[in-house]
Each structure stands twice: as structure tokens, then as C-alpha cells.
Image (cartoon, rainbow, N blue to C red):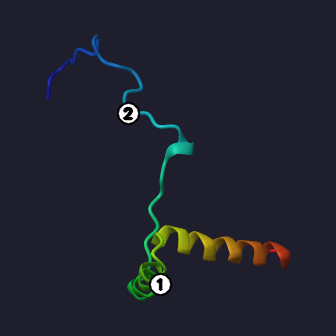
Amino acid sequence: MKKEYDFSKAEQGKFYRPIEELEIPVYLDKEIKTFYSAKALKKNIDLNKIVNTILRKEMEMLKAMGM
């Protein structure tokens, strides 16, 4: 490792991404992914759309229950 590094030509914030743009991966259990992937394929829609629809309905249900 060098004693000193020259950062005079460095670009500040080159790799910075605002938190709003950060995508956090969600990992599904194999059984769940297989089941819903088959449903998505059968209906010719994206798996993400099915999972988001299910989670949105669950969220609405929990809100209605006051949770």
C-alpha cells in the first residue's frame, strides 16, 4: 500500500446512489417461487407483478385490521 494516494483527479460522488433508488433484493423460498412462477407463466405476466399484488392485498388487509 502506498504512503499517499493522489485524489486530485477523483470524481466526488461517482458511485453515490440516493437511498430512494436503492433496490433491496427479496429472496423467495423455492416452493413459493416455483408456485407463483408457474402462475405468472400461465397468465403470461411478470412474477414481480404477482408478488407485488399479493403483498399489496396483504398490506391492505393488515391496515384494515389496525396493524
Q: Position of residue 41 (x, y in %)?
A: 41, 79
Q: Position of residue 33 (x, y in %)?
A: 42, 81
Say which mark, if any, is on residue 49: none
Question: Which quadrant does the N terminus fall into?
Answer: top left
Displayed quadrant of residue 54:
bottom right
Say which label, 1 or 2, has the lower sequence index: 2
Q: Position of residue 10 (x, y in %)?
A: 30, 18
Q: Amino acid at mark 1?
A: Lys
Q: Nearer the viewer, residue 6 or 50?
A: 50
Q: Position of residue 46 (x, y in %)?
A: 46, 69
Left or right of 56? Residue 27 is: left
Label 2 residue SS: loop
Displayed quadrant of residue 67:
bottom right
Question: Measuring 43% from the left and 72% from the top, which residue is drawn there?
Answer: 27
- Whether 50 is drawn above or below 20: the answer is below
Left or right of 19? Residue 12 is: left
Say which mark, if any, is on residue 39: 1
Q: Viewer-nearest of labels 1 and 2? A: 1
Question: Measuring 44% from the left and 83% from the top, which residue is drawn there?
Answer: 42
- Whether 24 is drawn above or below 40: the answer is above
Q: Amino acid at mark 2?
A: Phe
Outermost residue, top side: 8
